[in-house]
Each structure stands twice: as C-alpha cells, then as structure tokens.
Image: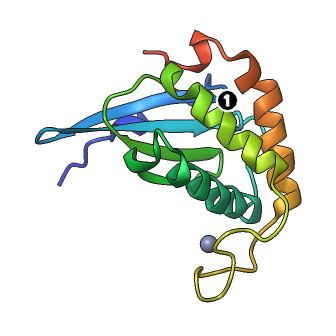
Amino acid sequence: MELKKITSFTINHLLLEPGIYVSRIDHFGDTAITTFDLRMTAPNREPVMNTAEMHTIEHLGATFLRNDPDFGSKIVYFGPMGCRTGFYLLLAGEYTSAEIVPLITSMFEFIRDFEGEIPGACARDCGNYQDQNLEMAHWLANRFLTNTLSCIDEKHLIYPD
Ligand SMILES: [Zn+2]
C-alpha cells in the first residue's frame, strides 16, 4: 500500500518560526474542527522542549482552556506534538489563528504565573504524575509571550503555501 503524505508533513519545517498556525480544517457532517499548531520553538534550529515541562504546559493549558467561558465548550483537544516543538489545539468550529490570539495569550499568561499544585498531577489522575517541571513551564510560557505572542504578525499566523 502506498501511504499518502499527510498535510502536516508537507509544511516546510526548514523555514518555520514560532507562531500560531491553522494546519487543517476538517468537516464531519455539520461540524467543522479547526486544528491549530502552536509552534513554540523553531524546528530543527533550536533545542526542543523537554517532556516534563511540556507535560506541565499540557496539564495547565488543558485546564485553562476547558474552563474558558467562551471557548471551554469548543475545546476538542490540547496536547503535545511528538517532535516537542509545540502543541496541537483542536477547536469545534472554523477559526483563523488571529481569532484565538487573545485566548492563547491568556493561556500562556496563566501558565507563566501559575503557582501551587498542578491540576491533575497526582497518581490517580495522571499516568506519569511526577514528570512535571513548573519552573521551565514558566520560562517557556514567558519566552513565547515575549518573543512571539506580544508582537505576532501575519507571517507567524499563516503557514506559507
Ligand atoms: Zn499527566
């Protein structure tokens, strides 16, 4: 069987910079699902994130998103990319990246400032609960806010063709 290259592998990672990109919009009957790539490091040119801090961002990010009064009911999925350069966010509905900049900015401010017990980080609620790094999650959130989200432009919101 010849396997088709899936869309996300056709993006030129050599030129990609951190940003918020729509990677695809799928339709299931009447429902559309928008998949966003939240790219936090430059692929193959910067060190990737370690799993512990990604795990912390996943727990805090998912908790924040699902509690958001406007978007909470639209969150289909939030989780890490296997390449450890960023996260996937799936939303019910059709959206542009520009429309979720405020949501993503608030989420990373929440992560940057979060203190205390990480939600879900206990043996009952998580499959590897001790693998967390809140300090590095703070640092990465701050870097993404400062270097990318605070000054985001079209080039970092839309994948090149
Ligand atoms: Zn976990």
For badge 1, the amino acid type reads Pro
The outermost residue toward the front is 69
Q: Quadrant of ligand 1?
A: bottom right
Res. 145 image quadrant: top right
Question: To which residue does mark 1 refer?
Answer: 18
Residue 80 in view:
no
Q: Along the horizontal axis of the image, is 28 left or right of 88?
A: left
What color scheme is it?
rainbow
Q: Position of residue 108 (x, y in %)?
A: 71, 41
Left/right of residue 44 with respect to residue 161 in the rendered view = right
Q: Choose top left, top right, bottom left or bottom right for residue 141.
A: top right
Residue 83 place in picture, x, y as percent: 60, 51
Q: Quadrant of residue 151?
A: top right
Judge by depth and name the residue closer to the eye, 106 or 139. Answer: 106
Q: Residue at x 54, y 53 (%)?
A: 67
Q: Which residue occupies 46% across, 48% down? A: 72
In front of the other: 60 or 34: 60
Query: Please, is residue 159 above or below residue 123 in the view?
Result: above
Residue at 61%, 35% (x, y): give it. Answer: 104
> Which residue: 38% across, 45% down?
74
Q: Is residue 57 above or below residue 129?
A: above
Q: Nearer the viewer, residue 128 or 118?
A: 118
Looking at the figure, which quarter contains the C terminus? top left
Query: How far across and how far down the image is residue 85, in percent?
Result: 65, 45
